[in-house]
Amino acid sequence: MSGTEVFLAGFPGADDRRGYKHEARAMQPVRKIVVKGAVDLFFRRFGTPHLVVAGETEEALRRVKTTIKGDKLVVESEGHGVQINSAHGSISIGSVSGGSIYVNGQRIDIAGVGGGRVVVGVALPELPALKIKGSGDVSLMDLRQAGLEIEIEGSGDVTADGQVEQLEVSIAGSGDVDARELIAQRGHLSIAGSGDISAHVSQEVVARIAGSGDIVVRGNPASRSKQVLGSGSVRFK
């Protein structure tokens, strides 16, 4: 087994990705990771920086662009366009990752677009600030660090476990952050839209909602501040 395969084996679902083509890419310490589009990304702690892209096909690998801009890593999925022609005209869609569209009330299913499934694995001594723009799905494993900042614009999802002193989560849209297994001492959690946050905060938490989002806080923090503008809710368990 190659070093890249050993690295990928440390992420969940490794058995499902047997036979995937993989590619190690240039990586260095960064202060921010930005995920754009429909990207599945896994992060785990490691002493030296690593970045690996694994996909079912070579086309899937090419679809994911990774760029280091200054102190920022940008991971972006480039979708494939679809054009539908009929006697009534045509429809062009710039980027599609799957799903259904409707034309004159008739559903047209789109599957397997873009050359197959693809995942990105990132390893650093600790996770820098994370921003998702779009529908990315990010898993953060076994974190051990002072602070963690997560920002979602869109419908992205984040799952995290480990321990941090300070947790900051900001969602604009319908994103979802599941940090029930991430033990934080202090938390600042905010939603603008219909997103959801589940967090475990042991000492102090500030929770803010503008819209229909929901925040659930575990850990019984002694200091609690909450504000809800709209139909959303903040609950303590």
Image (spheres, rainbow, N blue to C red):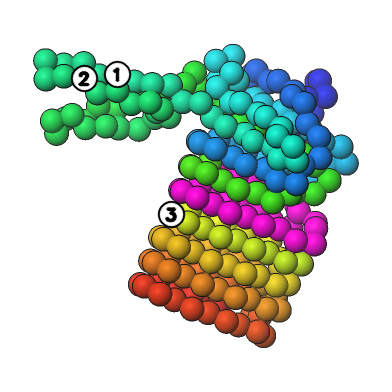
Number of other residues with Cα within 10 Å of mark 1, as a class: few under 14, some 14 to 19, many 20 or more: few
| Sequence-first disc among 1 and 2 | 1
Q: Is residue 232 left or right of residue 92?
A: right
Looking at the picture, which amino acid does disc 2 mark? Answer: Ser
Residue underneath mark 1: 83
* Res 90 label: 2
Q: Which mark is residue 174?
A: 3
Q: Is residue 149 visible?
A: yes
Give how far across and how far down residue 123 sits, in percent. 77, 39
Residues shaded magenta: 137-164
Q: Find residue 32 and report its horizontal and vertical position in percent.
A: 70, 46
Q: Is residue 116 left or right of residue 29?
A: left
Q: Which mark is residue 232?
A: none
Quote the CA–CA distance across marks 1 and 2. 7 Å
Tell me where residue 163 sits by quadrant: bottom right
Q: At label 1, which amino acid type do we have?
A: Gln
Q: How far apart, in angstroms, are the residues tagged by discs 3 and 2?
A: 31 Å
